[in-house]
Image (cartoon, coloured by chain):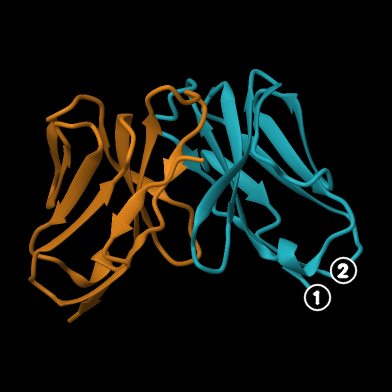
Chain colours: A cyan, B orange
Amino acid sequence: DTAVSQTPKYLVTQMGNDKSIKCEQNLGHDTMYWYKQDSKKFLKIMFSYNNKELIINETVPNRFSPKSPDKAHLNLHINSLELGDSAVYFCASTSQGWGTEAFFGQGTRLTVV
Amino acid sequence: GQQLNQSPQSMFIQEGEDVSMNCTSSSIFNTWLWYKQDPGEGPVLLIALYKAGELTSNGRLTAQFGITRKDSFLNISASIPSDVGIYFCAGHHSGGSNYKLTFGKGTLLTVNP
């Protein structure tokens, strides 16, 4: 049973397109995150949701819109994709805001061409 | 935002050698976490530290929460080829959001058999 699952694992798309990445966790956690890992492997937090409420929005362009239909799901929709959006996007979840025992998904490698 | 200085950036060692890496911060942290990321996978938690001075082991791994709460180290003893990967320190800094986990830039470990 996968704890945090993301789909798709790979996504190749053209500039200007709109795409979504889905994330689901079956751990019963109440906090979920999106992280972006660039080509230098630096992990940077983008968003944090607690019980479906947005807690953290780290200066991410408006083209990125997270949506949490329930506390087990946190999806990421990206409008008007740009070349610089190419990266690996990780979803993660924790049982509380401390971020301890944070479980990560396998990542979605997004390539914008 | 808060920065974690992780060093070294990369290490090339022979199988059987011991490894040490560390993270420092200019501000106080409440928790220190060490993660490992294998190629094509998400980070996996290795060790979590919650108290200043705490020394915790997990098999061949040992990590310590610095007494000043501004640093942490991770040691790997008797390295084996499967230790290859990127090791990240992470933590929550005092006065920051409990929902924000800040990551170091990672240490890429290569183990030659």
Residue B109 placement, left or right of B54: right
Per the image, label 2 sits on a secondary structure element best described as loop
User: Please, which residue is most extreme toward the bottom here?
Assistant: B113
Residue A101, x across and y down, in percent? 39, 32
Query: Which quarter of the picture shows residue B47?
Result: top left
The residue nearer to you, when weighing B82 against B111, is B111
- The residue to which callout 1 is attached is A113
Residue in view at x 81 percent, y 64 percent? A82
What amino acid is found at the position of numbered circle 2 in the picture?
Answer: Met
Residue in view at x 37 percent, y 36 percent? B91
Q: Is residue B107 above or below residue A32?
A: below
Q: Identify the disc placed on residue A84.
A: none
- The residue to which callout 2 is attached is A15
Residue B3 placement, left or right of B46: right
What amino acid is found at the position of numbered circle 1 in the picture?
Answer: Val
Label 1, label 2: how many angstroms apart (C-alpha)? 6 Å
Asked whether the beta carbons under mark 1 and mark 2 sit within 8 Å of each other, the answer is yes
Q: Is residue A110 above or below residue B2?
A: below
Residue B65, x across and y down, in percent? 19, 35
Residue in view at x 50 percent, y 65 percent? B40
Per the image, label 1 sits on a secondary structure element best described as loop
Q: Is residue A14 above or below residue B67?
A: below
Query: Which quarter of the picture shows residue B67?
Result: top left
Q: Chain of mark 1?
A: A
